[in-house]
């Protein structure tokens, strides 16, 4: 008899594994404990998601959130750096951390039998870091080197510039690493102030996915994070004022670069915006394309055909492009990022992008295109949840950014309900006659003027 099949009264049926179970509990200090069991595994991912990133930096010490991430692994009041590294290696855990504009995350992947020890380690890193002055100076040099490396990653550079012009003189406009001159001045007081201001129970989630017992995880949360206090008043990422999106530009002419990087953006959708998934479907119609894949002239995306063939010119005008959405608690960026050879006619690509946006706004899209974009979105969402770490990331991001978690079934239902008319109405609301931000690095001489690009947003 085949494994997984039982014979009952002459019939054979497949034995289905227990479905994953998602549960949440909020501790008295406001910390959310969230778990999703995966009965078929003996491993787990456990981590802490904090609703605080570079956006919460003091403008005078920009880069503090990222600096803290580096120092967390340099020793605590309970564990020296050597003992911490040895302990993690001895139990075979994989530990990591990252900082974004709105979140700081520490997580481990481990054997489920070692879950308690891993939660203890995470708590130690977050609440008992020594912040030793010598370690601060050592990491300062490491972070400055990292800054040098990021400066060579032009896809990151162009999006940092895009944030700077779209949210000028605002917290979202600052880079995650911070400017070099401030990295050189960040001190222990800045780090302590960031922790005491932002590491609050109601801004944190302890998330466990895999072979996890929710009730036991709640007890661990109480034991290891129960001493963290609540915020004095309900936290709001943006304070009292919503971010202001600016239609502006930055162009950096650099003849040494063989490839030019260009990013366009209108103000996009927040994480909890009612049209969040409509924006994703609309982007699916615009599509994503890369010359190295080889698909171009036969692509269902008109923009991909233009990028690959230049239309009637039959000459490629881009190396790649990507319709993207970057969301935050109360705003977002939505647009197209593309790369092109330095001798390319960038105006043709800009015109192609705006033609596609106009096609959405004017209703020149088919129901088949919408259904294809919906199918691609659902597939990409499901493929992204392929292991416990990816699921923990999905849960943690949603819980700290929106206060709730949409299950894959909830997401599918919302995506499935989107119609062609929804996409058209969305394009008229989010795209038509809206201010536009632009950032470009490389040979930017063939880019249209910002006024010309802005005028092109009327889609007439």
Image (tube, rainbow, N blue to C red):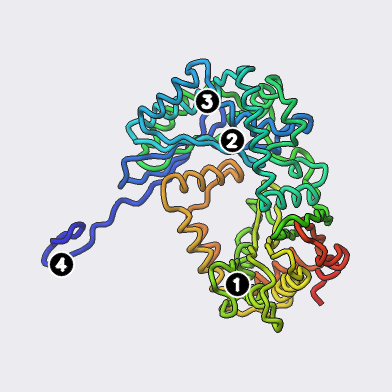
Measured in 3D between alpha carbons, the distance from the residue under mark 3 to the one under mark 1, in whole angstroms, is 47 Å
Q: In the rendering, at what x and y percent does residue 119 appear?
A: 44, 29
Is residue 352 placed above or below 381 in the rendered structure? below
Labels in figure, total:
4
Is residue 190 placed above or below 389 in the rendered structure? above
Q: Label 3 belongs to which residue?
A: 125
Residue 302's quadrant in the figure? bottom right
The residue positioned 73% from the left and 69% from the top of the image is 344
The residue nearer to you, when weighing 441 against 205, is 441
- Secondary structure type for disc 3: helix
The residue positioned 66% from the left and 74% from the top of the image is 316
Q: In the rendering, at what x and y percent does residue 275 appear?
A: 65, 60
Measured in 3D between alpha carbons, the distance from the residue under mark 2 to the one under mark 1, in whole angstroms, is 35 Å
Earlier sequence position, callout 3 versus callout 2: 2
Earlier sequence position, callout 4 versus callout 2: 4
- Secondary structure type for disc 2: strand
Q: Label 4 belongs to which residue?
A: 11
Q: Taking 225 as reference, is 439 left or right? A: right
- Disc 4 crowd rating (10 Å Cα; few below 14, some 14-19, many 20+) is few
Q: Are marks 2 and 1 in contact (CB under 8 Å)?
A: no
- Disc 2 crowd rating (10 Å Cα; few below 14, some 14-19, many 20+) is many
| Visible residue check, residue 460 | yes
| Visible residue check, residue 236 | no
Measured in 3D between alpha carbons, the distance from the residue under mark 3 to the one under mark 2, in whole angstroms, is 13 Å
Is residue 340 placed above or below 190 in the rendered structure? below
Which quadrant: the C terminus? bottom right
Measured in 3D between alpha carbons, the distance from the residue under mark 4 to the one under mark 3, in whole angstroms, is 55 Å
Q: Label 1 belongs to which residue?
A: 419
Earlier sequence position, callout 2 versus callout 1: 2
Measured in 3D between alpha carbons, the distance from the residue under mark 1 to the one under mark 4, in whole angstroms, is 42 Å
């Amino acid at each position: 008899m085949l494994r997984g099949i039982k014979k009952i009264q002459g019939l054979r049926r497949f034995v289905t594994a227990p479905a994953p179970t998602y549960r949440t509990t909020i501790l008295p200090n406001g910390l959310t404990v969230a778990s999703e069991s995966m009965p078929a595994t003996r491993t787990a991912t456990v981590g802490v998601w904090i609703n605080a990133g570079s956006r919460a930096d003091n403008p005078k010490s920009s880069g503090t959130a990222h600096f803290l991430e580096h120092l967390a692994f340099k020793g605590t009041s309970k564990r020296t750096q050597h003992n911490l590294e040895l302990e993690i290696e001895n139990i075979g855990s994989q530990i990591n951390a990252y900082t974004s504009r709105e979140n700081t995350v520490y997580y481990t992947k481990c054997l489920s039998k070692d879950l308690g020890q891993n939660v203890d380690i995470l708590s130690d890193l977050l609440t008992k870091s020594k912040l030793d002055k010598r370690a601060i100076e050592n990491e300062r040099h490491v972070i400055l080197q990292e800054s040098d490396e990021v400066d060579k990653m032009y896809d990151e550079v162009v999006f940092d510039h895009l944030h700077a012009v779209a949210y000028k003189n605002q917290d979202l406009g600052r880079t995650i690493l911070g400017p070099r001159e401030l990295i050189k001045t960040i001190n222990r007081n800045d780090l302590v102030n960031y922790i005491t201001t932002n590491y609050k129970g109601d801004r944190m989630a302890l998330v466990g996915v895999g072979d996890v017992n929710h009730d036991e995880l709640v007890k661990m949360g109480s034991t290891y994070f129960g001493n963290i206090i609540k915020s004095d008043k309900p936290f709001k990422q943006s304070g009292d004022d919503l971010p202001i999106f600016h239609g502006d530009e930055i162009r950096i002419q650099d003849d040494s670069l063989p490839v030019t990087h260009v990013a366009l953006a209108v103000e996009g959708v927040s994480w909890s915006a009612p049209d969040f998934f409509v924006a994703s479907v609309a982007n699916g119609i615009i599509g994503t394309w890369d010359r190295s894949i080889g698909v171009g002239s036969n692509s269902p995306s008109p923009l991909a055909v233009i990028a690959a063939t230049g239309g009637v010119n039959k000459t490629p005008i881009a190396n790649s492009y990507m319709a993207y959405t970057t969301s935050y608690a109360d705003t977002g960026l939505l647009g197209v990022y593309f790369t092109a050879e330095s001798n390319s006619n960038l105006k043709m690509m800009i015109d192609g992008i705006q033609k596609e946006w106009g096609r959405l706004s004017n209703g020149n899209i088919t129901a088949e295109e919408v259904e294809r974009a919906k199918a691609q979105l659902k597939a990409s969402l499901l493929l992204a949840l392929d292991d416990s770490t990816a699921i923990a990331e999905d849960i943690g991001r949603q819980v700290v950014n929106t206060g709730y978690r949409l299950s894959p079934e909830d997401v599918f239902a919302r995506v499935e309900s989107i119609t062609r008319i929804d996409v058209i109405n969305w394009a008229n609301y989010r795209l038509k006659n809206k201010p536009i931000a632009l950032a470009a690095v490389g040979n930017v001489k063939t880019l249209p003027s910002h006024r010309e690009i802005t005028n092109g947003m009327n889609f007439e």
